Amino acid sequence: MTTEAIISTRDLSYSYPGGIAALSGVYLDILPGEFVAIIGSNGSGKTTLVKQFNGLLKPSQGHVIVDGLDTRTTRVSELSRIVGFVFQNPDHQTFAYSVWEEASFGLKLQRLDEESIERQTTDALRAVALDGLRDRHPRALSRGQRQRLATASILALETPVLVLDEPTTGQDSLSRRQIMELTVDLHGEGRTVIMVTHDMSLVAEYASRVIVMQDGQVVCDSQPKEVFEREEIMKSSGIELPPVIRIARGLREYGFSDTPLTQEELVENLITAIRR
Amino acid sequence: MREPIVVVEDLTFFYSGSKEPALQDVSLTFHRGETALLVGATGAGKSTLYMCLNGLIPHLVPGRVGGRVIVDGTPTSDLSISELAQKVGFVFQSPDVQLFSHTVREELAFGPENLGLTVSEILHRIHVAAATIGIEELFEREPAYLSGGQQQSVAIGAIWAMLPEILIMDEPTSNLDPQSSQRVLELIRALNREHGKTVLIAEHKIDAAARFADSVLVLHEGRIAMQGGPRQVFSQAEELHQMGLVAPTAAEVAFQLSKYGYTFDSWPLTSEEGIQAFGELL
Ligand SMILES: Nc1ncnc2c1ncn2[C@@H]1O[C@H](COP(=O)(O)OP(=O)(O)OP(=O)(O)O)[C@@H](O)[C@H]1O
Ligand SMILES: Nc1ncnc2c1ncn2[C@@H]1O[C@H](COP(=O)(O)OP(=O)(O)O)[C@@H](O)[C@H]1O
Ligand SMILES: [Mg+2]
Ligand SMILES: [Mg+2]
């Protein structure tokens, strides 16, 4: 398995300079093309874990191997060609004077030709519905718009691995759907997607694999359907059932036996069951 | 009985240099003891409206204002930001812009100290706030070095310690895990019910928030698009969709089923109500 993995962690532990132990003994293999959701309580170590994937943080103990490269000995600039990283807080990421400049910055660093920069930037801005605001100063955007801009500037890079730390936080349902549709498209093109989220509906709908963090450790690594059956894990990891699953479960006592993961599935299953 | 506490009259606001108004002709009234939920697409003007209520607009944010805002009887233009801060507690959308102390303890003490409370009262307040929000373990930590959700909890705790008459929360649960979000919303409800405080909250997580609100206000492109009780607003799924918004899941499912001719006596909002309503059809 190890040879296939695009990201592997081996006995990964990490303590912040002040001494806070944020990760302890994490072993993971993430395979190319997976769509992984990382979930867990506030402070459980999710952001710390994914920051290891592009070398923003280096292990205190153990190793992280990205596409065959050990992050301890590889420069962040090299890792960032493989792993695109969207921060939890967009303001840690935006710095340019216009939306366009921000979104195209990474591509310029990669010295792409003008035409590709133009195309990839336009595509990315359109995907997050900011193409109409290309000359706006990032600071004059609403917080949700800034988050989308941060996402666009990473999407434009078209890296093989995409790490999204709470990409839909503070987004309305339309932008949330747009961001997810784009992510699904990129995943469909063969990219590996690793998404940290507190939105259990997203987990149910999109993830093929769910990693649950608790106190710096992986306490569950499974498929969404299975995780949502593990009541003890959910309870101790700050998780609640997404509404669709909660409703479907509640309907069991009325003879409803399906296990839909999306709202559309729930509606379809309900109609079939009612007509029966 | 329904005493107005915040009155907004024909409010229009242009950020300086901007040709489009962020708010246009907004008029509304919030009553003492009410919990109002503000929804709207990103960029609709929620944060701008809230900054008008705590005086950041017009006192600090450059721009052009029309109309006026009256808080507890006095126009905000006649009150300083610090006078307003005594009445209006504000939890910012990005918690890290709000946190500036070296320890969580100091952060929580800052507000009560400015209210001129006695030392023992201050200590009491910060311990109650920390225990209520569940951040006692973080007391000696530096806010800048906390996880996103922990920072948000601290920001909420800091306002909690002030027990303001009006509590404004701009997407307060955006970074919180599902259980913590639920807990914060329940606590806000308790503050409102037990202490009679007025709570204005902007949220995208309407599945969790809908049942806590007395009233719902929908902003769209700087204007008020809908206003009413939660059941009234969230039963209009089509109108919400046109604004890029959705109703709670149970209401959305009911809306889809209604297209097939199924009807509901009472429109379900929560999962529990959904189970009940859909169960009856099965
Ligand atoms: N820069 C930092 N310096 C010191 N400690 C930190 C820092 N960032 C996070 N921590 C601590 O490390 C632990 C893990 O934090 P992390 O940010 O990884 O959590 P998370 O799972 O992403 O949480 P959230 O859901 O709130 O974003 C927490 O105890 C947190 O307080
Ligand atoms: N500092 C600013 N300068 C100029 N325009 C701004 C500023 N902040 C927000 N805006 C614009 O004002 C409108 C309303 O934004 P905001 O109130 O933040 O929306 P919301 O909180 O509903 O997401 C948006 O069009 C946004 O781009
Ligand atoms: Mg995090
Ligand atoms: Mg806002």
Image (cartoon, coloured by chain):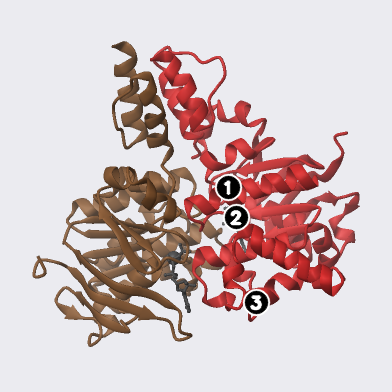
Chain colours: A brown, B red
The residue most toward the front is A232
Gap in Å between the C-alphas at discs 1 and 3? 25 Å
On the question of residue B199 being in view, the answer is no
At horizontal 49% and vertical 47% (from top left) the residue drawn is: A172
Crowd around label 2: few <14 · some 14–19 · many ≥20 (10 Å): many
Q: Is mark 1 within 8 Å of ligand 4?
A: no
Please say if the residues under marks 1 and 2 sit with CB atoms less than 8 Å apart.
yes
Residue on which the image places disc 2: B172
Q: Position of residue A102 (x, y in %)?
A: 42, 70
Q: Nearer the viewer, residue B267 or B273?
A: B273
Residue on which the image places disc 3: B100
Same chain, labels 1 and 2: yes
User: What type is the residue that disc 2 sits on?
Assistant: Pro
Query: For residue A268, which quarter of the picture?
Result: top left
Q: Position of residue B58 (x, y in %)?
A: 78, 61
Residue on which the image places disc 1: B203
Secondary element at image label 1 = loop
Q: Position of residue B225 (x, y in %)?
A: 63, 35
Establish if B214 lies above or below A72: above
Secondary element at image label 2 = loop
Establish if A262 lies above or below B123: above
